[in-house]
Image (cartoon, rainbow, N blue to C red):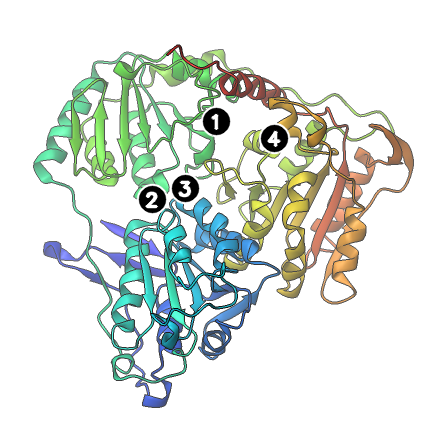
Amino acid sequence: MDTKVGSLDIGCPPHGGVSSVQTSTVPISFSEATLGRHLARRLVQIGVSDVFSVPGDFNLTLLDHLIAEPGLNLVGCCNELNAGYAADGYARSRGVGACVVTFTVGGLSVINAIAGAYSENLPVICIVGGPNSNDYGTNRILHHTIGLPDFSQEIRCFQTVTCFQAVVNNLEDAHELIDTAVSTALKESKPVYISISCNLPAIPHPTFTRDPVPFSLSPKLSNHMGLEAAIEAAAEFLNKAVKPVMVAGPKLRVAKASNAFVELADSCGYPVAVMPSAKGMIPEHHPHFIGTYWGAVSTAFCAEIVESSDAYLFAGPIFNDYSSVGYSLLLKKDKAIILQPDRVIIGNGPTFGCVLMKDFLLGLSKRLKKNTTAYENYHRIYVPEGHPLKSAPKEALRVNVLFQHIQNMLSGDTAVIAETGDSWFNCQKLKLPKGCGYEFQMQYGSIGWSVGATLGYAQAATDKRVIACIGDGSFQVTAQDISTMIRCGQNTIIFLINNGGYTIEVEIHDGPYNVIKNWNYTGLVDAIHNGEGKCWTSKVSYWAWCWLVLQMVLCEEELVVAIEKAMGEKKDCLCFIEVVVHKDDTSKELLEWGSRVSAANSRLPNPQ
């Protein structure tokens, strides 16, 4: 079993031993053997080269030591929430991310982003500069707190959204606590919390001079007998099916089983679909790929094949009210094999525990008979999708036309970040070329996530040009860190889709609260740019009637010019293209999905 963390391969050595992250063999002088430098070295060792931070008096000395570490770059963000989102986006590309904030006032600000990373199984190391070690147990009241002599409020809040919490307020056990936190984040693929007293980072200690210090990760192993029994039962279940299918779910990431899933697909010939939150985890150029399975809002002909199957294998699914389109999926449990990262459930039973998904998929690939019936059915009924109606000259741009042009921008050198909202549905229909990245946050669904995540992802994936699709409502939540993108010299292309409000909420339940104050978005970005760094914005050049008021509208002709400039002359710049569309111009999938989610939300209480 091999896992990958950042740029480091962490593999399972022969005979079930432990694997270790290689550390530097350069001797460390006692003066450099400080807590701050030890933490910095650990981050570099696991593949983190950028840390997202917001300064505060409790973390300033720690930041000094992080800056001093060769190979570690400190990225200052405009607020803690965005720093957390950036660490989330970074972890999606590198395998692990990190952020540094100050005590309580910073920690409780970043916690929403950490909760999102927890829901998406991302190892994010959240570091907090804590109170002076002498203040613990003194009954003193400190600033940046809620005014009580109790320093545990912050850690108690983090206990439910991290898999390990460490409060480092003495040097003797600091080494052990930090290493345990970091290794736990990697093993569990979840965020961890580390609080470090503000007076400790600069103090040398003998425990930090031992380099390399063994930093080992015990590999997870399948129960051999359970694995064999699960494979045998699953093979019998699937081999007797007439038209079985495979569906990839989002937990393929934490199980590190995407390659094993593809190997199984290659060997068995089943059609391959993805759940919406797993888009990008399976290559869409696979010969048997049939699209996104999302119930009533699936891509064309995909749901018909999946739901008419007599056996379906779901690898790492999350079935919630959003992914099930208001609990309306037409699936039957007795037809399903459900794989979780460490267990297998076949139909109504049995369940096999201590079976790793990767091992199971690889073993099953050697036991299944080739069966292409379901894919042949898909190929038989498939009709190529049409193209949007041709725009009239100077006609206001339509969303379906916009995404047709975005489709043409994609290559193996790009990555798509889709914000919560109608971009979920429009981006889901994009066909990803080989090597094209794709990320969105479906389980937590926090609006504004994409600005920080785009910053972090682009900082990590320097070989790709990020294309972010962000609604105006979401952008207003986290717009500030456009400034950090410019400062970091990123060349992301951001499409700001301006339709005057929270469109996804409108389609669930409309009200005046879904309408927002319109901004001059390109003017705002120009002001943030302020002539420093490389940034280019595209704004419309003529006036037209558009939802409620007379204002500027982007038409297809101008969009073409803007994209050509962004991909050519301005390829080294951050490019911000504002697209004004009608407030009711939404994808058909959002209309369907919104009505079903609304019905699920509005169910009357069960009789008592």
Could you tell whether 121 is left or right of 395 in the image?
Answer: left
- On residue 119, the disc is 3
Q: Earlier in the sequence, mark 4 or mark 2?
A: 2
Q: Earlier in the sequence, mark 3 or mark 2?
A: 3
CA distance for labels 2 and 1? 20 Å
* CB contact under 8 Å: marks 4 and 3: no
Q: Earlier in the sequence, mark 2 or mark 1?
A: 2
Secondary element at image label 4:
helix
Q: Which residue is mark 1?
A: 322
Could you tell whether 587 is left or right of 122 in the image?
Answer: right
Q: Nearer the viewer, mark 4 or mark 3?
A: 3
| Amino acid type for the residue under numbered disc 1 | Tyr
Q: Which residue is mark 2?
A: 254
CA distance for labels 4 and 3? 23 Å
**Percent of width and height locating residue 586:** 67, 25
Q: Which residue is mark 4?
A: 426
